[in-house]
């Protein structure tokens, strides 16, 4: 009888674990669906079609300077040392306001700002913090390693700022490993949130 009672308690405990796991999965599924709708909305606004993109080989220089240009929307830059694909990473404010998405493919990280926010490259702290202290520093570090022969030149971290006038349309990042991806997500989210706060004030 005691054995049966212990067995029942074990089954009840197991059932509770299953119910908790199912709830977690359902919650995750709901979040993914919301994220998917956000991504679809942003991509539709940009007219972003991966199938229409042309592949342009990336030819790194020994010391690749930061690049800022108004690239055509169908441009695709080749990444040599990419993180594992994570598809789409949404960046939001603490109030759950969409700032951007990071689309991760086999070739690059594509940071696509929410175009309805009209982020300007002139709004602090974009240039001073994100470009100069984060992106440029990562590139300088890799360029130095390449000069010392500790890193292949085609594996040097590089980035492009795609703009339309003063409006930020995309940041294309190449050769970002998983550790840098974590830092980039945090830095880009913080930067865009501060820019959004300044725009609203």
Image (cartoon, rainbow, N blue to C red):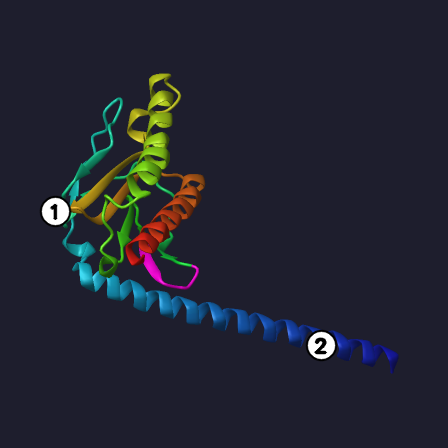
Q: Nearer the viewer, residue 83 or 196?
A: 196
Residue 97 colored in magenta in the image:
yes
Judged from the image, the secondary structure of the residue bearing numbered disc 2 is helix
Q: Which of 174 and 117 is in front in this view?
A: 117
Seen at 19% across and 37% down, the residue is 68
The magenta region covers 94-101
Front of the two marks 2 and 1: 1
> Where is residue 148 drawn, in percent x and y?
37, 16
Taking 128 as reference, is 190 above or below it?
A: below
* Direction from residue 30 to residue 152 in the image, left or right: left
> Where is residue 21 drawn, in percent x and y?
57, 70
Q: In which quarter of the image is residue 182?
A: top left
Which residue of the protein is positioned furthest toward the top in this rendering?
Answer: 148
* Direction from residue 183 to residue 52 in the image, left or right: left
Judged from the image, the secondary structure of the residue bearing numbered disc 1 is loop
Image quarter hosting the C terminus? bottom left
Question: Can you tell which mark lies on residue 85?
Answer: none
Taking 38 as reference, is 126 above or below it?
A: above
Q: Mark 2 points at which residue?
A: 11
Q: In which quarter of the image is residue 65?
A: top left
Q: Nearer the viewer, residue 79 or 2?
A: 79
Seen at 20% across and 30% down, the residue is 59
Q: How far apart are marks 2 and 1 (CA)?
A: 60 Å
Q: Mark 1 points at which residue?
A: 72
> Where is residue 126 drawn, in percent x and y?
30, 43
Q: Is residue 81 among the parts visible in the rendering?
A: no
């Amino acid at each position: 009888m005691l054995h049966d009672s212990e067995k029942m308690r074990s089954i009840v405990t197991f059932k509770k674990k299953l119910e908790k796991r199912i709830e977690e999965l359902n919650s995750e599924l709901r979040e993914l669906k919301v994220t998917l709708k956000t991504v679809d909305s942003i991509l539709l606004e940009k007219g972003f079609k991966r199938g229409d993109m042309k592949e342009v080989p990336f030819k790194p220089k020994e010391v690749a300077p930061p690049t800022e240009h108004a690239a055509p929307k169908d441009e695709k830059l080749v990444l040599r040392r990419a993180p594992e694909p994570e598809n789409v990473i949404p960046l939001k404010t603490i109030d759950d306001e969409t700032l951007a998405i990071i689309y991760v493919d086999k070739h690059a990280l594509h940071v696509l700002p929410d175009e309805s926010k009209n982020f300007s490259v002139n709004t602090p702290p974009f240039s001073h913090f994100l470009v100069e202290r984060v992106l440029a520093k990562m590139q300088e570090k890799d360029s130095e390693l390449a000069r010392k022969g500790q890193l292949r030149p085609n594996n040097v971290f590089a980035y492009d700022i795609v703009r339309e006038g003063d409006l930020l349309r995309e940041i294309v990042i190449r050769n970002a490993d998983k550790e840098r991806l974590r830092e980039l997500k945090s830095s880009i989210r913080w930067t865009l949130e501060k820019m959004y706060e300044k725009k609203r004030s």
